[in-house]
């Protein structure tokens, strides 16, 4: 019985992954390297510093992960306020909010980054009962560890098996499954959907999701 919904943010609710890809490509090119789709998948959904470590090591960049983030953030921060909601996301969250279904966000973003990304979406954030973020002191390990989802469930006062998670990344899917939750994955169109076979459902867009399939209120 699904009673609570938990969403990732980047690439799931908000179209920020296209911004990350654009900036990561630009910084990699400065060092004569190529940020490709395999690397994009490897870092998707992970905490910021973990992603930077993977990127620097994989590309063999002559800088530290923290130095990489300094370069990246100079390009990325001005773009965050342009992030738009992905198709179907606002309709679903409004629908479930209207039916008093508790909803939460569980994102690897830091509080500072989250606030920049959502600065134009304050009304939308009212749909969510809680927000659990990657720099929360109670999270020992980031995705693909289950910590962030288990903490969200704890704060929602709900058992993990009663939670449905929406994710877009492999790391996020694995974290949700490890937490004992059901998971719907809506991956980037460039990713091979065969990689997400462990998910309970995989869609191209949130517009394909049918709430009644999970015993949730049907759209009118």
Image: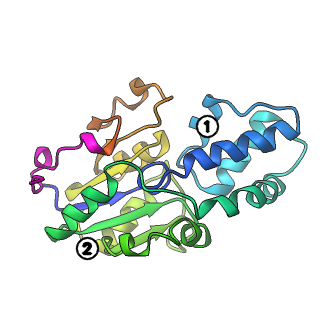
Q: In front: 192, or 172?
A: 192
Q: In front: 25, or 1?
A: 25
Alpha-carbon distance for marks 1 and 2? 34 Å
Residues marked 1 and 2 touching at CB (< 8 Å): no
Total count of labels = 2
Disc on the earlier residue, 1 or 2: 1
Magenta residue span: 207-220
Which class describes the residues within 10 Å of circle 2: few (<14), some (14-19), or many (20+)? few
User: Does residue 134 sit above or below 62 in this rendering?
Assistant: below
Query: What's the residue at 37%, 69% (across, down)?
Result: 124
Which residue in the structure is indicated by mark 2? Answer: 157
Name the spot of residue 156 as percent of width and height, x first. Answer: 28, 72
Whether residue 184 can be seen here? yes
Q: Which quarter of the image is occupied by the C terminus?
A: bottom left
Name the spot of residue 17 as percent of width and height, x first. Answer: 56, 47
Relative placement, left or right, of 46 versus 169 is right
User: Does residue 27 sit above or below 7 in this rendering?
Assistant: above
Which class describes the residues within 10 Å of circle 1: few (<14), some (14-19), or many (20+)? many
Q: Is residue 175 magenta?
A: no
Query: What's the residue at 59%, 69% (across, down)?
Result: 116
Q: Which quarter of the image is occupied by the N terminus?
A: bottom left
Tell me the element at label 2: loop
Which residue in the structure is indicated by mark 1? Answer: 40
Quarter of the image for residue 217 reads bottom left
Query: What's the residue at 37%, 75% (across, down)?
Result: 123
Q: In front: 19, or 2?
A: 19
Name the spot of residue 107 as percent of width and height, x first. Answer: 48, 60
Quarter of the image for residue 74 reads bottom right
């Amino acid at each position: 019985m699904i009673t609570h919904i938990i969403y990732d943010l980047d690439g799931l609710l908000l179209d920020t992954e296209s911004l990350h890809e654009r900036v990561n490509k630009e910084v990699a090119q400065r060092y004569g390297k190529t940020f490709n789709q395999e690397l994009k998948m490897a870092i998707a959904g992970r905490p910021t510093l973990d992603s930077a470590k993977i990127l620097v090591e994989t590309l063999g960049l002559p800088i530290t992960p923290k130095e990489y983030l300094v370069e990246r953030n100079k390009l990325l921060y001005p773009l965050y306020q342009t992030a738009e909601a992905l198709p179907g996301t606002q309709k679903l969250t409004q629908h479930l909010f209207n039916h008093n279904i508790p909803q939460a966000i569980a994102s690897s973003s830091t509080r500072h980054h989250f606030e920049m990304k959502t600065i134009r979406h304050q009304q939308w954030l009212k749909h969510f009962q809680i927000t659990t973020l990657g720099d929360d002191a109670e999270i020992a390990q980031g995705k693909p560890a289950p910590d962030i989802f288990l903490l969200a469930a704890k704060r929602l006062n709900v058992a993990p098996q009663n939670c449905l998670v929406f994710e877009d990344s492999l790391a996020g899917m694995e974290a949700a499954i490890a937490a004992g939750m059901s998971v719907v994955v809506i991956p980037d169109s460039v990713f091979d959907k065969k990689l997400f076979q462990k998910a309970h459902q995989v869609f191209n867009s949130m517009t394909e999701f049918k709430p009644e399939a999970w015993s949730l209120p049907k759209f009118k």
